Image: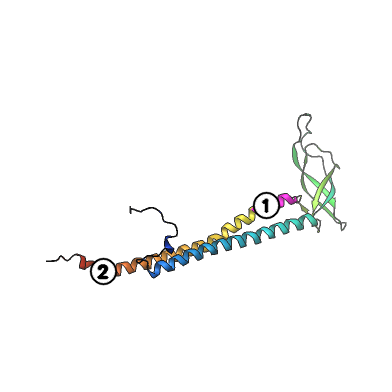
Amino acid sequence: MALRGPKVWLWRWRRNPLRRRADRVEAWVVLGVWLLTVFVGVLAGTAVSRSVEDGLARERVEWRPLVGRLAERAPGTAAENAQVSRAEQVWATVRWTAADGSEHSGQLRVPAGSAAGAPVTVWTDPEGRQVTRPVTEPQARVRASLIGAVAGLCAAVVPLGAGRGLRSRLERRRIDQWDAEWSRFGPMWGRTAG
């Protein structure tokens, strides 16, 4: 293991007579990669976040609740215990009429033991197809932020990986130059004066 001294911040930018051209190039590459990584991450995260939030806002505007009726009695028994705040939910077949007059049916979670013909709320898209309840505005903000953050991190990996590859090529080149110089000057160190 190599002995290292104290960590010096911005060592690539300090004046040093031993600093080579490759060291200056690496300093600029590191700076450029970090700037590009931050820029790409923020740009991708912001774009994805806005896109998701716009899509969820469009769903809130377009999706409408309709009243559907249970086609059959829901399986199970209704909760008789008054302390149970939420009855057991089961899947049951529901039928509804879309805005254009077409009949539709689908599966929906309803309280256990609900009677046939009981009214239930069904959320539909403009074509009358069953959809889930749209998220609220605060939920949409949180969801869009999380998805945007993940997308930004994933996008930032690309320039970071490319910069890492470029730095490893520069390192290999520098090692090859050192080997060439060592083979030229190394034998001179073995000579003794005499």
Element carrying mark 1 = helix
Say which quarter of the image contains residue 51: bottom right
Q: Position of residue 127 (x, y in %)?
A: 81, 59
Residue receiving disc 1: 143
Q: Earlier in the sequence, mark 2 or mark 1?
A: 1
Disc 1 marks a residue whose amino acid type is: Arg
Q: In this rendering, does residue 91 appear at all?
A: yes
Q: What amino acid type is highlighted by mark number 2? A: Ser
- Percent across and percent down for residue 186 are 24, 66
Examine the structure image and report whether residue 76 is included in the region drawn in magenta: no
For disc 2, the marked residue is: 183
Q: Dividing the picture into quarters, in which one does residue 46 lie?
A: bottom right
Q: State the predominant SS element of the stretch in magenta.
A: helix
Pick out the residue farthest to the right: 101
Look at the image and give the residue range highlighted in magenta: 134-145
Where residue 132 appears, as percent x and y from the top left, is 75, 50
* 128 relative position to 51: left or right: right
**Residue 132 relative to residue 10: left or right:** right
Q: Residues within 10 Å of mark 2 (few under 14, many from 20)?
A: few
